[in-house]
Image (cartoon, helix red, strand yellow):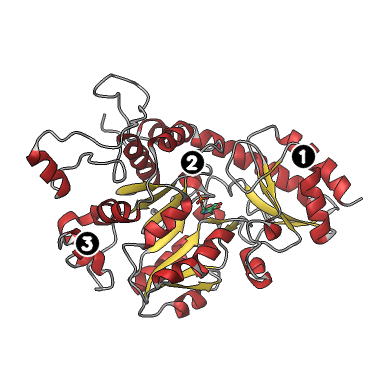
């Protein structure tokens, strides 16, 4: 069939075909550490990257590869690498780009764990981060210097549901000869396709919507295959002889697949942040219904956000799908199928009322997670964003008077009824 396959078809079929050994229709869980070589020449060809195949599951595994190929297809990328968590994906994404002394420019509006990882942990590798408000395009440009190696943003930023102007940031990255990395966890490729909007790399916490049922942690990096790693001399791991892989020049040898192969052959080999086949299987199960779930998440989120916005006990709601949002116009280009299922709202009564509200909810689960079929609630300032300073919390959209909702796929009216009774207790 020559027709280009649609999203709903790709989410079910991409990367998978009946198992050649058994005919199994569903992707089997290849629960094995190692794979038998045909002979010594086969083994040498695999290690030389002259032939694609399986060596050892820290590097590649057929179940994990099926998932990587599926996510790459859904994002419109050339290749993808799965890893053990979203946080692992972020380190893995930076690894081929960075040397000690290099920095990244990152949005202030990020998941709190990412702010922490980029503020403190990556310093141990000699890397650093310059945080900027990515709505201030002049500030983004000004933050870039000779040592900058990437710009990093979330498409729909956790927790506030803020929408990043990806085409505008991509234009800045392009002019500076830098890759733009988009964390597409909260939007998913169904709502937002960062590569089509100019991004170079897309990272995911597959833990969230891609799996969709709160069962496993995982991450993924998708490469557009379009970036010229040799143009500036700033990415020697990809453009120059790589000492960690017997002097191979990845970009020259592998072209648009250079980044993906580097991430497997060196990133997974040496950092070992590998996704296991069981986790890949759960995510493959979940991803088959991604578009159906996202449609319901968006419809429910809009209904709940509209109800909250008119409620006198609520100060304001940050959902970008509301006409009152400053990002309402932006979703038309960045997230044309909807503003996602994640947003915050301010409860009149501040911190104490927020904590009472979270305790009073019955249907919503109070957990540090998002993107589940179940509706979830958290008070970011006292949990996920707790380690940040008050200024960082405010910049991230996690002020103490805000409660974050991850709206599930239940009946919206039941969710509204639950919020109604909990608001009554919280503001009594
Ligand atoms: C937007 C976003 N990116 C990355 C992560 C990290 O993912 P993981 O928990 O799978 O490491 C999270 C976790 O909540 C997240 O919300």
- Image x and y of residue 335, in percent: 52, 51
- Sequence-first tag of 1 and 3: 3
- Image x and y of residue 71, in percent: 39, 42
**Residue bearing the label numbered 2:** 210
**Residue bearing the label numbered 3:** 244
Residue at disc 1, secondary structure: helix
Q: Which of 247 and 249 is in front in this view?
A: 247
Residue at disc 2, secondary structure: loop
On screen, residue 418 versus residue 36, left or right, reads right
- Sequence-first tag of 1 and 2: 2
On screen, residue 323 versus residue 333, left or right, reads right
User: Distance between the Cα atoms at labels 1 and 2?
Assistant: 25 Å
- Image x and y of residue 183, in percent: 47, 55
- Sequence-first tag of 3 and 2: 2
Residue at 77% over, 51% down: 309
Residue extending furthest toward the top: 23
On screen, residue 181 versus residue 394, left or right, reads left
User: Distance between the Cα atoms at labels 1 and 3?
Assistant: 55 Å
- Image x and y of residue 11, in percent: 42, 35
């Amino acid at each position: 069939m020559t027709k280009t396959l649609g999203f709903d078809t790709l989410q079910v079929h991409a990367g998978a075909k009946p198992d050649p050994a058994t005919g199994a229709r569903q992707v089997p869980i290849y629960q094995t550490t190692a794979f038998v070589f045909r002979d010594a020449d086969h083994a040498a060809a695999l290690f030389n990257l002259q032939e694609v195949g399986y060596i050892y599951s820290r590097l590649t595994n057929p179940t994990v590869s099926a998932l990587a190929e599926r996510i790459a297809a859904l994002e419109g990328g050339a290749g993808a690498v799965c890893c053990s968590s979203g946080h692992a994906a972020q380190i893995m994404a930076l690894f081929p780009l960075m040397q000690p002394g290099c920095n990244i420019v990152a949005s202030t509006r990020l998941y709190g764990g990412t702010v922490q990882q980029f503020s403190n942990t990556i310093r141990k590798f000699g890397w650093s981060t310059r945080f900027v408000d990515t709505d201030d395009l002049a500030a983004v440009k000004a933050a870039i210097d000779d040592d900058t190696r990437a710009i990093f943003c979330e498409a729909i930023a956790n927790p506030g549901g803020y929408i990043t102007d990806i085409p505008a940031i991509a234009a800045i990255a392009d002019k500076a000869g830098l890759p733009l990395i988009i964390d597409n966890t909260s939007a998913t490729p169904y709502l937002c396709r960062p590569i089509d909007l100019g991004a170079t790399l897309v990272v995911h916490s597959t833990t969230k919507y891609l799996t969709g049922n709160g069962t496993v942690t995982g991450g993924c990096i998708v490469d557009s295959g379009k970036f010229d790693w040799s143009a500036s001399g700033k990415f020697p791991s990809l453009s120059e002889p790589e000492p960690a892989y017997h002097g191979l020049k990845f970009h020259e040898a592998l072209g648009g697949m250079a980044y993906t192969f580097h991430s497997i052959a060196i990133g997974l080999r040496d950092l070992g942040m590998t996704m296991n086949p069981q986790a890949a299987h759960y995510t493959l199960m979940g991803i088959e219904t991604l578009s159906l779930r996202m449609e319901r998440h968006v419809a429910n989120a809009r209904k709940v956000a509209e109800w909250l916005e008119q409620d006198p006990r609520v100060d304001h709601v940050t959902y970008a799908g509301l006409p009152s949002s400053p990002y309402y116009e932006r979703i038309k280009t960045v997230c044309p199928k909807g503003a996602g299922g994640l947003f915050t709202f301010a409860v009149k009564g501040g911190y104490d009322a927020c904590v009472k509200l979270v305790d009073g909810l019955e249907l919503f689960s109070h957990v540090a997670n998002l993107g589940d079929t179940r509706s979830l609630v958290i008070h970011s300032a006292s949990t996920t964003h707790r380690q940040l300073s008050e200024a960082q919390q405010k910049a991230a959209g996690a002020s103490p008077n805000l409660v974050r909702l991850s709206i599930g796929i239940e009946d919206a009216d039941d969710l509204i009824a639950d919020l109604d009774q909990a608001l009554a207790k919280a503001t009594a």
